[in-house]
Image (cartoon, grey):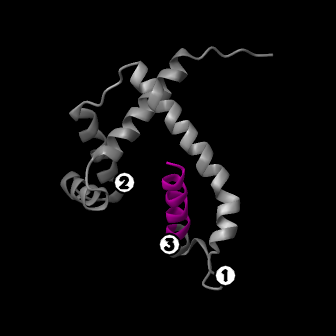
Amino acid sequence: MVEREFEDILSRIESHRRMGGGSQQDAPLKLEALQKEYMPVAEERARSRILLQIIAEQEKLKVEERELDEEIGLMARSMQATAQEVKQWVLARQGSLEGLRTRIIERKALDLLHEKAEIVEE
């Protein structure tokens, strides 16, 4: 899971560079330096995701088809595409819609934590 998070971070960095976030004169990305800087971030993200998944299981949170369709619709609007195009794009990249389902479940678990949180000011 940590490796997947790290690969996601690398992918986002590379996308940012391609979209103009870095100049052509930027040095090529060095894996060792990136690992040193971003592996702790990837580890923290993985721990957070595991915790949210455990909460989702304990609370028996589920994703309804309507929620999946809404998520695809939001993505479609932001990508200026149709819902069907986005769905096909996700399926082509990931092979299934499970990544979207996981994201929705994690968001629901986080929302539940926010609802139940008691803020204590010191």
The label number, if any, that marks residue 19 in the structure image: 3
Q: Foreground residue, 18 or 91?
A: 91
Pair 1/3: label in front? 1
Q: Residue at x 47, y 24 (%)?
A: 55
Residue sitting farthest toward the right: 122
Up/down of 62 relative to 8, above or below: above
Report if residue 86 lies within the magenta region: no
| Percent x, y of residue 9 | 55, 58
Mark 2 residue type: Ser
Residue sitting farthest toward the bottom: 25
Mark 1 residue type: Ala
Mark 3 residue type: Met
Residues tagged 1 and 2 counted as in contact (Cβ below 8 A)? no
* Residue bounds of the magenta highlight: 1-15
| Alpha-carbon span between mark 1 and mark 2 | 31 Å
| Alpha-carbon span between mark 1 and mark 3 | 16 Å
Q: Residue at x 52, y 55 (%)?
A: 3
| Percent x, y of residue 68 | 27, 39
The residue tagged with tag 1: helix, strand or loop?
loop
Q: Residues within 10 Å of mark 3 (few under 14, many from 20)?
A: few
In this figure, which residue is indicated by the disc labeled 1?
27
Residue sitting farthest toward the left: 84
